[in-house]
Structures are given as C-alpha cells and as structure tokens.
Image (tube, grey):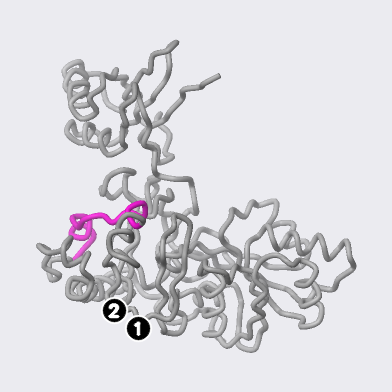
Amino acid sequence: MSKFYDALETRGAASREASLFADLRKQIAHAKANAPYFARTLAGVDPASIVDRASIAALPVLRKSDLIELQKSAAPFGGLTAVANGALGRIFMSPGPIYDPEGKRGDYWRMARALWAAGFRRGMIVHNAFSYHLTPAGSMLEMAAQAIGCAVVPAGVGNTELQLRAIADIKPDAYVGTPSFLKILLEKAAETGSDIASIKRAIVSGEALPKTLRAEFTARGIDVLQCYATADLGLIGYESAADEGLILDESILVEIVRPGTGEPLAPGEVGEVFVTTLTPEYPLIRFATGDLSMFVPGASPCGRTNARLRGWMGRADQTTKVKGMFVHPGQVAEAAKRNGLAKFRLVVTRDGDNDLMTLRIEAPRNESLAVKLASDLTSLTKLKGAIEFASPGTLPNDGKVIEDLRKYD
C-alpha cells in the first residue's frame, strides 16, 4: 500500500502551481457569482488575470478578525458562503463567536491526508478525543478517519475514566485529540492499571507539541505526529514521519506575508500565514489567519514535494497603543516601503511616564533617509519616532514589525 495518500503529493512544483491557479481562477469566478461578500470585494477582478503569486498578492485581504462583524451584519456567515444554507451539513461555533459551515461532502475538511501520513489505514479503530460539542474538531477528524475506512469511537473531551474503560474494551489502534489529553490518559492509565497499549499512533493538534512530550509518547510506544488546521479553513499542514516541518495540503494556496500588510515574504522569512481555499461552499480568498510561520526551504525527505511550514511561531497582531494612539504594523510597513526598506522594526519603550518610539532599520547610515523616514512615520502614525540604523543581519527574523518593551509596575 502506498505511503502517499494520492499522486498529488509527489507532483512537480510547476505542475502543482499550474493546477492550483487554474482551480483558483474557477474559484474566484464561482465566489463572485454566488457569495455576496466576494461579489463586492472582487467586483473589479478578472479571474483570468490571476495567473501567479504576484497577481494573487494584489487581491484584497480577508482577516479572521473581520468575521465576527461580517457575520453580525449578514447572519450567519457574512455573505461568504457560495451555496444555500440547505446545502450545508452542520454549522459550528468557534470562539468569538465565529460560525463555521460544514459541507455535506465526505472529508469536507480534507483532514484524511494528515491521518494517512501518520499511518492511519483502512480497518483501524480511531479513538477521537476532540470535542463534538459546537466546535468542529471532532467532526473534522471523524470525517477524515471514515474517508480512509477507519471506525471511530466518538469519545469527545473529559470523562477520563470512562474513556480509559472504552479504550481497554474496544482496543483502538490510534488516537486523535490534543497532546495534553493524551498525556492525561496515559498517566491515569498508569495510575489505575488500565490497558491502553493498543494505541500505537496518534495525530494531535490544537496545542503545541514540545519535543520532550513527543519523546515521552515515543517512549510509551506511540508514534505521534501533529497537524495544523483551523475551523475556518480545515487542514493547512501536516507532519510526516520525516518530522521536518508541516507539509501543505494539496488543495490550498498559502502565502507568508509581512504582518499588517499583504506583502509576500521570501522563504525563510517569518510572517503571517495567508490561506486561499478551493472549497466551493466556503471560498475563503487571501484569508489572514493571524498566525506567524515561515516556509522551510527545500522538500521533505519523505518524498512529498509540497512546500512546508516551520510550524506555529506566534501571533501576527502586533497593534499597540503609544501615547493613547493605536499604532498598526501596516503603518510601520508603509513608512518603510516608501523608503525602500526591507528590514525594519519599531521598538516601543518607556522613559518615566513617556512612551518612546524608535524605528530600527537595516541600512547604511544616511541622514537624509533618517529625516524622510521620520517624517513619513509621523505622517502615518501621528506620533514622532527616532530612527536608528542597524548593521545588516542584526534584526531578528521573528515576524515582528512592532516590539513593545515597556514594563509596568
């Protein structure tokens, strides 16, 4: 049996890009015709003009943080769905609240690819410890397991002792859920003498998986991989046995952009994760997740050829308040862009009761540049800031546009 879920995973880069953009042009036309939100925001966009990464970067951004107000203005989905409500199978609720539609197609969230990479196969029994109440995680993994041909124990969260009894009796082959709950199950099993040795593999998500915890699972005989998914987008990336980054799903376009802007960054640069889906029911285009990550250079040793993300590296929303005024990453980036700067960081400090802004830039010292940049910064933020020159390579590559160093007693 193939170690790959399908032939898409081993495509050449040019073939993958051509196929994705062909599908994206169809998706944009579909969204404009059927989703009121995109009919407005993409009104002037000719789908035929979207042919490469540069052209998609010119499209408007939809931020996850905008969904709450959009959905309040046009319940339940803010005009973003491109099918009638009757074509949906379920409606979930995420923190915010944000309401997430689920289509009626099998493996709607595309999670089966992640399970396959983790060794899940037809005939296995999967203990699903993700929540089945209002949030979609339980449904996401159940549909994926069933698409592969696995039976599912819909365990949900909590009821640790009852779950241990079910595992001992049913003897599932695999676990899906958070890493912290798997640790709880293992510790409680050791304490009570429950037999859960049947579980040999797991997919975890929703939390960080520290190396120490992964090593603990391995020592207990469980091969654990993680995946990156959201309630809006479904699967974004997943690990393989090579354990070298999160391989992108085959049905999405991912960009890494400078926080607060729509400006794409080169591989190796930390920035915000933007995702465009090809899901016809819920066509999210240039969706800003608010998560920070970076592309890992090269291809995975496992043989899958798609791009990889380093993993979750923090949150992109760095908006801060200085002297009572909000300063946004996009304002700082615009000041730098006007002056041809690629490496910069606004540092906010405090001197007594006074807030201070210093824009650090990687550039040769140039007083006329400093004067022009300071003027642009004030024009955009309505606040004065000092300019500080830094040597090339000295500013950290962590995705931060604004660093707030103020401390309050």
- Location of residue 353 by image quarter: top left
- Residue range in magenta is 51-67
In the image, taking residue 156 as reference, residue 165 lies left or right, namely right
Residue under the image location 44 percent in, 68 percent down: 234
Q: Which residue is mark 1?
A: 87
| Circle 1: element type | helix
In the image, taking residue 380 as reference, residue 325 lies left or right, namely right
- Residue 102 got which mark? none
Residue 323 in the image: above or below residue 289:
above
261 or 134: nearer the viewer: 134
In the image, taking residue 281 as reference, residue 222 lies left or right, namely right
Residue under the image location 34 percent in, 72 percent down: 12
Could you tell me the amino acid type at mark 2? Val
| Residue 81 percent coordinates (x, y) | 30, 72
| Residue 34 percent coordinates (x, y) | 21, 75
Decide: marks 1, 2 in contact (CB < 8 A)? yes
Residue 41 in the image: above or below residue 250:
above
Residue under the image location 26 percent in, 19 percent down: 384
- Residue 83 got which mark? 2
- Location of residue 102 by image quarter: bottom left
Please state, as top left, top right, bottom left or bottom right, where the C terminus lies in the image.
top right
Residue 226 in the image: above or below residue 369:
below
Mark 2 Cα-neighbour bin, 10 Å: few <14, some 14–19, many ≥20: some
